């Protein structure tokens, strides 16, 4: 594994080990010793996945303290445009980063607490796998509206849930981080 790029402070794009042969491929998405060697402390408390068709936009999600969490995400099928917004108080507040994740590139993102996360499915059958450092807490689940910060998603009318449409705008958001 290797760190490719720091997308936002403490938020890393990671290239995992991929083994390919005539049978297909084997991908090691996470390795505790590698994370610890690079100062990334992460214990998995929950894992889940989402499947989306092309044009589906999910985001921008996070959990409020004390149930905030670190996320480790990867796209295991299809391709997505992954988007991150720093919502931590300080110099990086409001900074935005994006990257494409796909089954082909097998890249992963280590997302620290205080980063709002979302993605746009670029292809049908996009499957995102999430590992988190805390369990889901409905009462601490939150988000900011996907279209309320300066980012061009490259789509006019994405498919968005009612929940995601109801998130507050970035300008009216009061960060707990």
Image (spheres, rainbow, N blue to C red):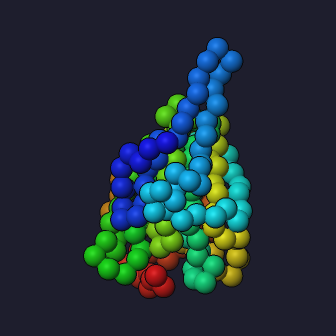
Q: Is residue 149 left or right of residue 20?
A: left
Instruction: Give coordinates of residue 3: x percent, y percent.
Output: 41, 48
Tell me what residue is drawn at x 63 percent, y 55 percent.
Answer: 130
Q: Write down the quadrant of residue 85 in the picture.
A: bottom left
Q: Is residue 65 above or below residue 126?
A: below
Relative image position of residue 57 (x, y in whole percent): 54, 53
Q: Quadrant of residue 18?
A: top right
Measured as percent of width and height from the top left, residue 56 is found at 57, 49
In the image, residue 42 sits, relative to residue 108, either above or below, namely below
Is residue 3 at all visible to an observer of this figure?
A: yes
Q: Residue at x 56, y 53 (%)?
A: 33
Residue at screen point 51% across, 71% down = 113
Q: Residue 35, image x and y in percent?
A: 52, 56
Residue 107 vertical position relative to residue 41 in the rendered view, above or below = above
Residue 148 versus residue 13 in the image, above or below:
below
Which residue is more in the foreground, 4 or 71? Answer: 4
Q: Residue furthest top?
A: 22
Residue at the (67%, 46%) spot, across then down: 51
- In depth, the one of 67 and 164 nearer the eye is 67
- Can residue 166 be seen by looking at this rendering? no
**The furthest residue to the left:** 91
- Say left or right for 48 vs 58: right
* Number of numbered labels in the structure image: 0
């Amino acid at each position: 594994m290797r760190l490719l790029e720091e997308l936002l402070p403490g938020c890393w794009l990671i290239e995992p080990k991929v083994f390919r042969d005539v049978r297909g491929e084997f991908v090691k998405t996470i390795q505790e010793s590698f994370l610890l060697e690079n100062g990334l402390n992460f214990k998995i408390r929950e894992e889940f996945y989402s499947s989306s068709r092309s044009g589906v936009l999910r985001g921008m999600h996070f959990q409020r303290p004390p149930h905030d969490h670190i996320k480790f995400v990867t796209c295991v099928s299809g391709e997505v445009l992954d988007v991150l917004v720093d919502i931590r108080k300080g110099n990086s507040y409001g900074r935005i980063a994006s990257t494409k994740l796909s089954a082909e590139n097998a890249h992963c993102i280590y997302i620290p607490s205080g980063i709002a996360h979302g993605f746009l499915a670029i292809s049908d059958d996009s499957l995102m796998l999430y590992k988190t450092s805390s369990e889901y807490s409905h009462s601490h689940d939150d988000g900011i509206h996907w279209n309320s910060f300066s980012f061009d998603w490259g789509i006019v009318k994405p498919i968005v849930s009612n929940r995601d449409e109801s998130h507050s705008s970035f300008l009216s958001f009061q960060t707990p981080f």
